[in-house]
Amino acid sequence: MGLLSILRKLKSTPDQEVRILLLGLDNGGKTTLLKQLASEDISHITPTQGFNIKSVQSQGFKLNVWDIGGQRKIRPYWRNYFENTDVLIYVIDSADRKRFEETGQELAELLDEEKLSGVPVLIFANKQDLLTAAPASEIAEGLNLHTIRDRMWQIQSCSALTGEGIQEGMNWVCKSVNSKKK
Amino acid sequence: MKSKNLACNDSHMNCLSGESLNAPEPLHCCQERSVANLTDHTAGSSQVRISLAVYLSGSHCLLDSKKMLGYIWQYVYTSFLRYLLKWLLRQATGKCELQRICSGYKPGATRTTKAEYSLRSSKNKVLRGALETNKDKLEQCVDQIMKVKNVKPQKDPQFKESLHVCLLQITGHSSLYTSVEDMRKEVFNSDNQEHEAMLLKLWDLLMPTVKLESRITKQWGDIGFQGDDPKTDFRGMGMLGLINLVFFSENYTEEARQVLSHANHPKLGYSYAIVGINLTEMAYSLLKSGALKPHFYNTVLGTPELWHFHQLYCYLAFEFDKFWVAEEPESIMQFNQYREKFHDIVKTHLQDPDVSLTLTVRSKN
């Protein structure tokens, strides 16, 4: 008998696997967020060509986080990853005001996707460490988040660079998975 | 801030946390790590954990005792046998270990790696200090070593030069890393005219017949940047990423354009610049880990310079493209899997003591 099977038996309840999709425009900070979640070094990040995936343990969940590249050219591939998504995390560069409209449009399109219907969405208003960052409240208003009625949603200001706000956001993710299962 | 991870605070094992799903490790590897994790945790059902660890060590006792013997042997060897052996050989040949290394192996990775090991494990301060000596003082340093080791230049006329070259290579590798790291830490800055000029130069080299309509334009996508301003694409590689891209285009213009045309293939294509920056990261981490030492020891019989590092980047950029085209991946979304595969191939090459990762086409300069 291998260790893994023993470990599985030892656990009172097996870890529930949660599929999390990390989307957003390029340079939003998705990969940095992913690496922060996995406690990895964030100083050598490069633009994501394709996708990265990591598995992180949190609050009795095994979070399988899919970080998909955000450049326009590969956004058409996003839909290949929608299936069985438990939570969508949408990352916004709060300091990139020029692209608020573009990011809002992409988010709106995602929320219209049939395969993502009812999937809870967490919006990370990232890069709050920058002085020019817009506050989460302003972004929420700009994106008309209050009009979302068909799912649970939450906006959380954070800095993937310093780690601030990430734990709070992930707590919400776990909570939303729990309440969805009930 | 890094401690802000989501590791569980209950008794669940987190042996899988942070590991890539698509690259499962062999089982025994995972088990070892779990045992390490068991000892890390103090809270919770520690008794269960200890008995588990005991059970595991029992089931792996064959493997462990083999490992243990290995450790004991290594300890005995490095702290006792090695010196005895060295002394015996010295008596028999009349030469010190460094002399035997320099005369016994041809110049290159084997000789320099052995010399490096010999110096690093020496009991003598002068010999160990040689590894951290400034380039200009190396000649004096070699004289000192010869004095300490009682090497007579008349008896071994080549030794001085051989050791000098070894030391230039060894100390040069760490100074190369420092220069590369400085370049990586320099952030691309649109207010810096040099940076801007270099970016525009990259365009002109790759797209000689097409004029850039403005500094901020979708055209950047044609050479594989993500958006309309490349400045956000250099990320953790900073200026090193741009300098590598420009170096390849400038010194291997034809090859770079050929690679770009492959990258722009409608089906098999990839983002030229983005992949280039990813390959800079590969070159950088190989350098940082010391994996490139044999390559530089074989190809540069002296101090490796920055352009040697850029040359290595050119090799990676050209070879990766060849590899990608030959493998015909389904789509760009598979990039990271193929990157890993390619990385493994490069690392395998670097295990060969005769490794030389050079682009076989002729450079213009």
Image (cartoon, coloured by chain):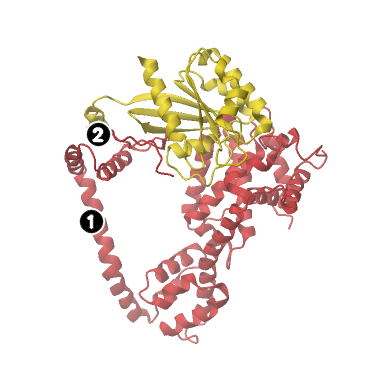
- Residue depicted at x 59% and y 60%: B179
Foreground of the two, B118 or B353: B118
Per the rendering, the mark at residue B188 is none
Cβ atoms at labels 2 and 1 below 8 Å apart: no
- Residue A148 location in percent, x, y? 54, 15
**Callout 2 and callout 1 share a chain:** no
Element assignment for label 2: loop
Check the image and report above or below for B256 versus A87: below
| Residue B125 picture location, percent across and down | 40, 76
- The quadrant in which residue B147 appears is bottom left
Which residue type does callout 1 highlight? Answer: Leu
Which residue bears the numbered disc 2?
A: A2
Cα distance between the residues tagged 2 and 1: 24 Å
Residue B162 in picture, x, y percent from top left:
52, 74
| Chain A pictured colour | yellow
**Chain shaded red:** B
Q: Amino acid at mark 2?
A: Gly
**Tag 1: Cα neighbours inside 10 Å, few (<14), some, or many (≥20)?**
few
Residue A141 visible in the shown view: yes
Q: From the image, tell me which residue sits under label 1.
A: B69
Which tag is nearer the camera, tag 2 or tag 1? 2
Q: Quadrant of residue B55?
A: top left
Tell me the SS state at disc 1.
helix
Q: Nearer the viewer, residue B183 or B170?
A: B183
